[in-house]
Image (tube, grey):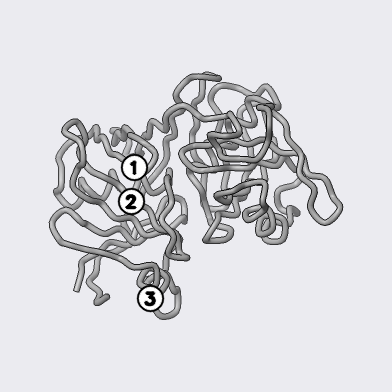
Amino acid sequence: MISFAKMHGLGNDFMVVDGVSQQVYFTEGQVRKLADRHRGVGFDQLLLIEPPQQPDVDFHYRIFNADGKEVEQCGNGARCLARFVRTMGLTWKHKIRVSTMRGLMNLQIMRNGLVSVDMGVPQLAPDTIPMRYAQQDIRYSVNLDGVSYEFGAVSMGNPHCVITVDDVEKAEVDRIGGALTQHNLFPEGANIGFMQKIAHDEVRLRVFERGVGETQACGTGACAAAVVARLQHNMNQKIRVYLPGGHLHIDWPGDGESLKMMGPAELVYQGYIDL
């Protein structure tokens, strides 16, 4: 039997497990079973917090999608991690450093209760996303069922494809997102964002996450959308991204600079479950 917490960041929900004070190992099948919203805990991702692997790091952070596959990054999950380790007494720090599959992250719990995450420098080169394009550009195109879609691409530690649309409510998120997330253009799959520009500092966004489907919010997706909005539409450095579950604040000075994301993280309940 293991202890866990159910948490969410703007409705993007997680099962968060303390792997520091208890020994835990998950198979893909166990994750899929736990992710079932009718017979399990139900979540978009499972977050496993482990002891640090480096001397200058507080925790190691692992993310598993609902399909059981381990992935590189999760922005909403990172905020929940910060709230979790404080709530559970695993640390008393307000500034926390964690390692992931793709590098290091700096988290800070703010006085207003929100959590700020330094997401690092967005990666734009096709081979770093990864994406099968020969040259880097701010606009790419892909053909799907005879229709060409223009998009921006960026890695926030995980791959993102962002399509600008006139009305995000009318976007065919499931059909187009479901097809593009496993398109051979993206050798590791991709998260597909549908972004509508509202003002020079505001966008609306819906995201189809690989291995999950459409979620209420996607932290790295919001970061990727802000990057594409800056590059393609010359939008402001600070952008508010409205998702179905709420909004996030993104601050990106520009190419080669680190991006910061700020938003809430909420504890829903704590429990115990047999694997």
Q: Secondary structure at mark 2?
A: strand
Question: Where is residue 147 shown, x and y percent of the image?
Answer: 84, 50
Amino acid of disc 2: Arg
Relative to 38, does residue 186 appear above or below in the rendering?
above
Question: Where is residue 102 shown, x and y percent of the image?
Answer: 39, 39
Badge 1 density bin: few <14, some 14–19, many ≥20, Cα 10 Å: some
Residue that mark 3 sits on: 40
Which residue occupies 67% across, 46% down? 185
Query: Which of the 4 image quadrants contains residue 164?
Result: top right
Residue that mark 2 sits on: 62
Question: Where is residue 115 shown, x and y percent of the image?
Answer: 35, 38
Locate the C terminus by quadrant: bottom left
Query: Which of the 4 image quadrants contains residue 15?
Result: bottom left
Q: Which mark is residue 100?
A: 1
Dots 2, 1 in contact, CB < 8 A: yes
Locate the N terminus by quadrant: bottom left
